[in-house]
Amino acid sequence: MAKKHCPNCGGALNIHADDAIITCSYCGTSFTPDGAKMKEHYALAVNYSQGDALDTLKAYLVKVPGVADDLAEKIQLKDLSMTYYPYWTVTVQGDVAYKGIDRKATFRGQSGGRYNSIHWEWVAESGHQEQTRQIRLYAGPKARAEIVNYPIATRSRRYFNFEEVQQYTGNVLFSKVSAETARQQATQATRNMIFSRINRETEKIDDARETFKVTDQAYIHVPIYHIQFTVGGGKTYEAALDASNGRVLFTDIPKTTSFKAKTMGMSVIWFALTGVGAYLTYLAYNGQTILGLNPDFLFYMGIGMAIIPLFLALLTIYFGSRGTAAERAR
Ligand SMILES: [Zn+2]
């Protein structure tokens, strides 16, 4: 950690060696370690109050299988805080003109609806792929996968307003990824997408002319609520929610004991049925049968009786054992 001073207001700053973009906690200015000011610094608006966040979480949780019907009344808030997480958004315009060869099949010697031979030949292939992509990259310190992979909604972005941010929290995380590294990663990601398309059409690329241009780059802070709660005391559960659009990034699921017992019992039953189905298939395979059924019919019936309950058993185990849930994009 090095002692530095804000180039804008002179306030003292605590900077870690791997901080790539620093936001002054006195005036809110963001700059690189060399002191260059970041102009394109945005934040998503806080559209959900703490109360809204808790209500939204409750409304989401009551729909999750396995929680008590009266969960909303039983939830007790233990802690609620907000953190601004840093992300980069980089828009990359990519253009690749390519020449290559592709294998094409020709069919020969048709007689009586059949081809006698398939002949492969190499054909010259050329084309042009153009794509513009907005790549989003998490830039902050180590965090849960749900935060790192969060597809932030950028439509409601507006310039980072320090007074506004301060109303909510002093917890603004710094970027560990420099503007240059973000551009490189976004360009690489766009390039990979374009080439995966070209590779579908061309077996071998001989020549490619590539142009990649960054048309927009922004540093964006996303306000995220961290919520800790209990269900009538006891175990502490955690959740995170986007303060700009109310999306639940993740939440622990407070499952009832009866749900756990029920799913356990159900999966035992499904597994038993799988066993019965497998046994019937085994009988039919050996030419035996039950209830005078046709062995061929019994064979397939047994397979069906084994596969369907097996699928249901696995589904039951999944819902019975998963500890966290996440909301899909709205
Ligand atoms: Zn400052």
Image (cartoon, rainbow, N blue to C red):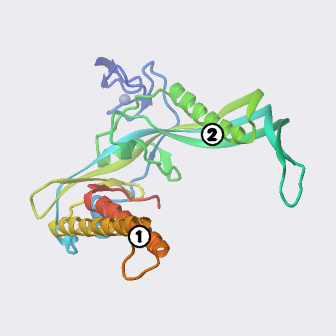
Do the numbered discs 1 and 2 sit on residues whose CB atoms are within 8 Å? no
Left or right: 281, with 207 as reference point? left
Q: Residues within 10 Å of mark 1 (few under 14, many from 20)?
A: many
Q: Position of residue 133 (x, y in %)?
A: 62, 43
Q: Quadrant of ligand 1?
A: top left
Frontmost residue, 20 versus 258: 258
Q: Is there any visible trace of residue 98 in the rendered image? A: yes
Question: In the orientation shown, which residue stands out farthest toward the bottom?
Answer: 291
Q: Which residue is pictured at 28% across the width and 40% down the height?
A: 170
Vertical placement of residue 310 versus 165, above or below = below
Instruction: Return the residue at label 1.
Output: 302
Image coords of residue 279 (percent x, y): 34, 66
Point out residue 54 in the picture as x, y percentages from the top left corner: 27, 62
Q: Give the position of the N terminus as an image quadrant.
A: top left
Mark 2, residues whose alpha carbon is within 10 Å: few (<14), some, or many (≥20)? some
> Is 50 located above or below residue 17 in the figure?
below
Q: Which residue is mark 2?
A: 193
- Residue 188 locus on image (x, y percent): 59, 31
Of labels 1 and 2, earlier in sequence is 2
| Res. 264 image quadrant | bottom left
Looking at the rendered image, the disc whose residue lies closer to the viewer, 1 or 2, is: 1
Q: Amino acid at mark 1?
A: Gly
Q: Residue at x 33, y 34 (%)?
A: 142
- Helix, strand or loop under label 1: helix
The CA span between labels 1 and 2 is: 45 Å
Is residue 293 depicted above or below 108 in this figure?
below
For residue 257, what is the image quadrant? bottom left
